[in-house]
Image (tube, helix red, strand yellow):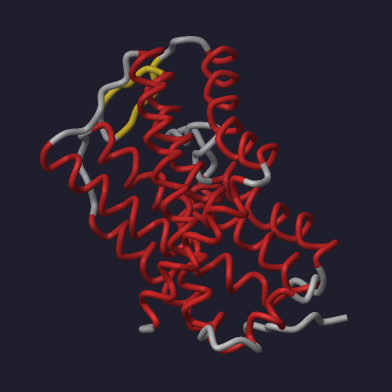
Amino acid sequence: MSGLRLSIRQVYYTNKAFWRNPAAAFFTFAFPLMFLIIFTTLLGNNEVPVGGREVSVATYYVAAMATFSIISACFTNIAMSVSFQRDDGILKRTRGTPLPGWSYLTGRVLHASLIAVLLVVICAAFGSLVYGADIPTGATLARFLVTLLVGAASFAALGLAVTCIVPNADSSPAIVNGMILPILFLSGIFIPIGDETPAWVRFIGDVFPVAHFADAMQSSFLGVPFRWSDVLVIAAWGVGGLIVGARFFSWEPRR
């Protein structure tokens, strides 16, 4: 059986395992909607500038929470779950089977990307029904889908790379959340970044891929001027994560 078919089968088995933990599955899909409701409730229906256009807070957070959904599904979840599977010996046993290692990891990345797409669809549908957010169409939709897929693959690669510095499963939540949460705040996911934002905050945000991903997602979702350079930065980080993961990824517990 070809490696690609094995990867697709791995997606199937990973999906079965995902849905067999209904509590984790529920909160994976509920968290973005909870944050969307909380932020729009607390901040009201004011307007924020995005790409030279004023948009409502609700519309802004629909795009922001779609971005957060992809990062959560492809970076946070992969980094934590792979760390736990490594400590439990699952990765070691998988490595000892005829299944190629790259097929297993590709299956994990593909499954995370599918969950991310489903999360974005739910966020967009909820935002359209509840807040009247516009759904991108035509060329805008095409840019949105390209950004989504590049972002999902890149953050999944970065999630695998992060496992290289996680010493054990118990420390993975602290390390992963400690790395991503500050960047989310500094990149305009939870709080809009405006002209009054300190320059050092914008500088730090621009160094990492989250701000570029947020800008590309918001621009393509809202139909404002779009920069392909943002997508290139995201892809470059993904390639870097792939290189680090390929070089230092460990299949055995590090205890």
The x, y position of residue 201, in whole percent, is: 55, 47
State the residue in front, 247 or 217.
247
Residue at the (17%, 40%) spot, across then down: 140
Report the residue at 43% width, 72% height from top: 7
Left or right of 208: which side holds 138?
left
User: Which residue reaches farthest front?
Assistant: 1
x, y (%) of residue 56? 37, 17
* Of the pair 56 and 74, the residue shown nearer to us: 74
Q: Residue furthest right?
A: 255
Quadrant where the C terminus sits is bottom right
Left/right placement of residue 175 relative to residue 182 reads right
Residue drawn 28% across the image and 39% down it: 219
Query: Would you say 165 lies left or right of 210 here?
Result: right
Question: Where does residue 90 sit, x and y in percent of width and height?
Answer: 72, 74
201 or 16: which is nearer to us? 16
- Residue 156 drawn at (x, y percent): 50, 63
- Total number of numbered labels? 0
The answer to which image quadrant residue 13 occupies is: bottom right
Q: Residue at x 55, y 88 (%)?
A: 98
